[in-house]
Image (tube, coloured by chain):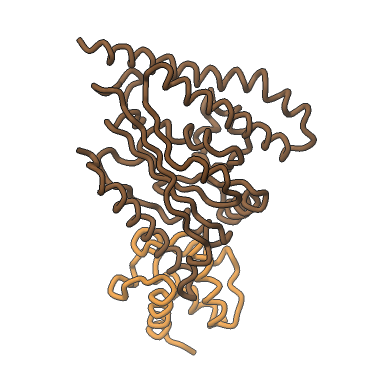
Amino acid sequence: MLSREELFETLKDNLEEMFEIPRESITLDARLYEDLDLDSIDAVDLVVKLQEILGKRIKPDVFKSVRTVEDVVNCVHDILSE
Amino acid sequence: MNIGRVWRAGAQGIAFAVFGLGGGLFTVAVFPLIAWVSSDHRDRHKRVRYLIHRLFRLFVWFVQALRLFEIDVEGAEKLTSRHGCLIVANHPTLLDVVILMSLSPNFQCVVKHQLWRNFFLRGVVAAAGFIRNDLATDAYLSQCAAAFDAGYNLLVFPEGTRTVPGRLPKLVRGFANVAIAARADIQIVVIQCEPVTLTGDEPWYAVPESKPVIRVKIGDYWEASTFDRTPHRGINARHLARDLETYYHHVLSDQSYGA
């Protein structure tokens, strides 16, 4: 079971690899859309990738309220805890 | 007293009036007829857009006959031979859309959703079946894909809005997402207007000192196969948007832009 720190690191790796986002700008309070310049299609790609990593489906409404990197980490952590 | 300028101010008023009233007239009198003789909405949209193409050709002639603008197009034949590609252009003036539609008989267009509330144009945009820019991603991409499949060229302004006068274009990534998702080639068009006018921020009678010249150049053609250079869609879209922005900066800086 991955800790929040490990999840954060994994998320950083993926955001960097999938979208060329500079690692330094990926902080827990960074907003996905305004700060990291993700758009709605990127969000879909991210969810697909997370599903691959987790081996579990992520329901669309679960991700709807996600705004910051920390939200993503918590979301994934919650799913893994189920 | 600059007689030419006074003339052009009046002529521009006439042009706006003709455009707006023409839109209203066709909505009331012509489009319903087209709907009546068309077998389904796709048929109707296609006919309406072709009619718009012909009317806009007339309008482009009209504004030149009024001595309001000079419009030079280089490479128009390239546009008529394209099918199922994305046509992108920078956007210095309000006339850009009219000119581009007058040059492609088989166009489709992404249009800002506010026009569906515009008194003169709401009938036109609905009858033409344009693609709204406020659709959810899935619906938006699938409508764009449908346009390409039907052989239409999709007109998109990658800046998302009109160019800021005197500044080089700043692109939004949306067009790149469409091109990559639909595997559509990109036909680049470069539009320049000297002196800068009709930017949308000024009153209807605002005209420059000298007669403006709008130069439309049908530029490079980028094939979709060149867009997937990395295994990551997100990176490819970002690179494509950046490449197009660089292209425009390069081409527009070569001339005495904004001087």
* A11, above or below B31, in the image: below
Q: Which chain is orange?
A: A
Q: Residue at x 58, y 59 (%)?
A: B182
Give the image location of residue B47, x and y in percent. Answer: 68, 33
How many labels, in total? 0
- List the single residue furthest toward the bottom: A1
Horizontal side, residue B196 vs residue B123: left or right:
left
Give the image location of residue B123, x and y in percent. Answer: 60, 27
* B241, above or below A3, in the image: above
- In the figure, what tint was chain B given? brown
Along the line of sight, the residue nearer the viewer: B120 or B49: B49
Q: Residue at x 22, y 13 (%)?
A: B2
Along the line of sight, the residue nearer the viewer: A81 or B145: B145
Which quadrant holds residue B213?
A: top left
Give the image location of residue B65, x and y in percent. Answer: 43, 18
- Image quadrant in which the N terminus of chain B is located: top left
Q: Residue at x 40, y 58 (%)?
A: B241
Which quadrant holds residue A24?
A: bottom left
Give the image location of residue B121, x and y in percent. Answer: 54, 27
- Image quadrant in which the C terminus of chain B is located: top left
* B238, above or below A48, in the image: above
Q: Residue at x 77, y 32 (%)?
A: B38
